[in-house]
Image (tube, helix red, strand yellow):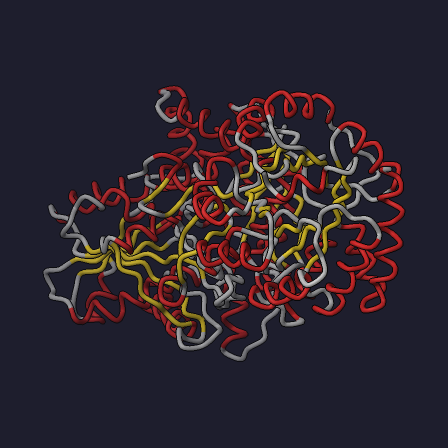
Amino acid sequence: MTNEKGRFGIHGGQYIPETLMNAVIELEKAYDHYKDDPEFNAELTALLNDYAGRPSRLYYAEKMTRDLGGAKIYLKREDLNHTGAHKINNVLGQALLAKKMGKTRLIAETGAGQHGVATATAAALMGMECVVFMGEEDTIRQALNVYRMRLLGAEVIPVKTGTATLKDAVSEAMREWTSRIEDTHYCLGSVMGPHPFPIIVRDFQAVISRETRAQILEKEGRLPDAVLACVGGGSNAIGSFYHFIPDEGVRLIGCEAAGRGVDTFETAATIATGRLGIFHGMKSYFCQDEYGQIAPVYSISAGLDYPGIGPEHAHLHDIGRAEYVPVTDEEAVNAFEYLARTEGIIPAIESAHAVAHAMKIAPQMREDQIIIITISGRGDKDCAAIARYRGEDIHE
Amino acid sequence: MSKIAEAFANGKAFIPFITVGDPDAQTTAACVREMVAAGADLIELGIPFSDPTAEGPVIQGANLRALKGGMTTDKVFDLVRDLRKDVTIPMVFMTYANVVFSYGAERFIRTCSEVGIDGLILPDLPFEEKEEFLPACHTYGVDLISLIAPTSENRIAMIAREAEGFIYIVSSLGVTGVRSEIKTDLASIVQVVRENASVPCAIGFGISEPAQARKMADISDGAIVGSAIIRLLERYGKEAPAQVGAYVRSMKDALR
């Protein structure tokens, strides 16, 4: 799906400082070599299976299905992975690759903290140094994850610039990478940034749809009618979609964080409110003003609170292969509580955006139709924030 | 020949940078005129961007102050129009790809040409992506300035061969900002540049003292200074122009 310079249609590319060019070229060469290397893949598979707990389960949500009274609902349980989210899939791949490249230090950005925790985990496992950049605002929203990262031996640097959220953490990680390239790999957490990151992260996350496709065929003997996942940068979504892209009959639905609504300024729904631009190394859609100033986006979910979307999603949107829908804070919080009560599963508030949209469409579908929702992470980290949203102050 | 060549015609060039609109347009205009009077050879005008990923904290601060003060791309063009009533030395823009792209590349570069901007420095537009803006730059005679970094190594010759206007050599790894020491082997980089380029080269990032500027200009064709000037604006605000003028004079004197 990519051509020269890592383009997805008109999106993608490598819009980065010259200082980083040789680093991304070196990364691309290393990845091209190792991605087909049987030894590398055997090592990675062993890590994914024995350490991260793959394959993750595809669970039939029978109560939810009955309650909503429409399509049959399956949940792809990425929340059951070690560290509690899909982020570990990508991180184990990149950390292993970095190690093969002779790097001894991993840096990462994080929003909700799940990617930071996963990176800190892989660094601990592989004996690498780890520094995580996290918006100061997010270190408050996700204090538990900050503690987890430190417990795992990582240094967490609160980023105070800009809106002090995910986009600023990405900017700061990029700045750090330009100042220290020799021993450092930037373990980017989503399908964004300059080529080859959107491809590397997508390939490592594609394990999700590779498993889901086989699992649903085994359980139902047919493909699903729709696959739903939440989208910030879009790593769990692209992972959930990837092996279904050639299956034209499968609707691919990305659920964006609309915050307080797409008609307000407090939103992070890029496809709904953004336009084409160039930022963080890529051409894609971004929330921005008429002069190209990046918008200070907002979502209750720190992991989706990002003003852009990965270039492959932008392309899937352009060609109409995937649909992107906005889901508000209120809808996501309702879904968070609904899934907890109905199935005994507390999803990450990010994943709850996908659950919320499923709650809208499932009742309109027939009982012989199937939808799969990727539960990208577990919601323990969000309990305090959701309690606050509901007006209850709990101390962790 | 590019107008930028004039900046290098009087010995070593001193190239000051200023973020437009920090703290307001009047102060920027006054600073530019002071810099010209103090002997600056080329002015680098920064169009503020919300997320300047190649900048250190000092210039990040200037970008935010300028945006908070209501600076926009259109107002920057207005300011240049006003400056061009009396400023004749070459001037270039330093900004980020999205500022150009969102304005419409063709419209932005055409306007540059109309108001009298001679070149464009975009730190997030490497050699591989320059086709994004190069055709319009050629149409309207605006030089797209290439950057070369300490990590460019095997890429130096390739970049230098196609360079226009002048080559911006980044002295150090990392982002913009004042540094006490510059460790990169710049002489070897400049040598490869000279073997391949038909345009002059100047060194920037980390330079603040006259002695440093002298050292950088000795091995290249000029010195670029940003953060040290922005610090004066940070400290003196609207009173900064006289300070900036005195500073530029001390730096240019060191290069004579």
> Who is closer to the viewer here, A117 or B130?
B130
Determine whether A364 is above or below B36 in the image. below
- Position of A246 with respect to B222 (left or right) is left
Determine whether A165 is above or below A18 in the image. below
Q: Residue at x 32, y 38 (%)?
A: A2
How many badges with numbers are in the image? 0
Q: Residue at x 63, y 20 (%)?
A: B195
Determine whether B238 is above or below B126 in the image. below
Which quarter shows the N terminus of chain B? top right
> Who is closer to the viewer here, B107 or A3?
B107
Residue A263 pos. (x, y %): 40, 77
> Who is closer to the viewer here, A171 or B70?
B70
Instruction: Let me know if residue A133 appears in the view.
Output: no
Q: Residue at x 15, y 49 (%)?
A: A248
- Position of A386 with respect to A362 (left or right) is right
Residue A328 pos. (x, y %): 39, 72
Residue A363 pos. (x, y %): 19, 71
> Who is closer to the viewer here, A239 or A74?
A239
For residue B10, what is the image quadrant? top right
For residue B187, what is the image quadrant? top right
Residue A61 pos. (x, y %): 25, 59
Instruction: Let me know if residue A58 appears in the view.
Output: yes
Q: Residue at x 48, y 39 (%)?
A: A91
For residue A333, what is the image quadrant? bottom left
Which quarter shows the C terminus of chain B? top right
